[in-house]
Image (cartoon, helix red, strand yellow):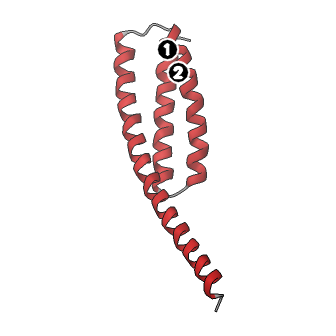
Amino acid sequence: MKANDIVSDYESLSNLTSEMRAAANAGEWDKLISLEQLSAQYLGRIQSAEASTPLNDSSRHLIVGLIKKILDDDTEISKLTRSWMEQLQASLNSNRQELLLNQVYGAG
């Protein structure tokens, strides 16, 4: 793989993280999971290629910018998913309490 191919994969990964961020923002969790699986494939390719491909300063500079953007997207995705998980946990706890009350006092 050439340095340009690695940069291209980082660009594709950056585009994917933008889509993932939009999906998380819209609450499209299935889409987020699907995109996350695709991003893992890019990461695998990048990691194996970087080990054997020398990068010039220009490529490194582009990649650093892309990584910063990817990490920014990842931070926002984490915040959004954490919020969703907290809401889901609260809902599950509420349902569990309702079920326990119904078991103790019987359904009205």
Residue at label 2? 46
Image point (56%, 40%), residue name: 36
- Residue 104 placement, left or right of 58: right
Instruction: Indicate the quadrant containing the N terminus: top left, top right, bottom left or bottom right.
Output: top right
Q: How crowded is mark 2: few (under 14 residues within 10 Å), some or many (20 or more)?
A: many
- Residue 66 placement, left or right of 46: left
Instruction: Identify the element where label 1 is drawn.
Output: helix
Q: Position of residue 42 (x, y in %)?
A: 56, 28
Q: Where 71 falls versus 31 (above or below)?
A: above
Residue at label 1? 50
- What is the tally of numbered marks visible in this picture? 2
Q: Where 52 falls versus 77 (above or below)?
A: above
Q: Which of 23 and 103 is in front in this view?
A: 103
As drawn, which residue projects farthest toward the front? 104
Q: Where is residue 48 in the image (x, y as percent from the top left)?
A: 56, 16
- Asked if the residue at tag 1 contacts the one at tag 2, i.e. Cβ–Cβ closer than 8 Å, the answer is yes
As drawn, which residue projects farthest toward the bottom? 108
Image point (34%, 11%), residue name: 57
Q: At label 1, which amino acid type do we have?
A: Glu
Instruction: Indicate the quadrant containing the C terminus: top left, top right, bottom left or bottom right.
Output: bottom right
Q: How crowded is mark 1: few (under 14 residues within 10 Å), some or many (20 or more)?
A: some
Image point (40%, 50%), residue name: 79
Instruction: Identify the element where label 2 is drawn.
Output: helix
Q: At label 2, which amino acid type do we have?
A: Ile
Image point (57%, 73%), residue name: 95
Q: Which of 16 and 93 is in front in this view?
A: 93
- Residue 57 placement, left or right of 41: left
Q: Where 16 falls versus 52 (above or below)?
A: below
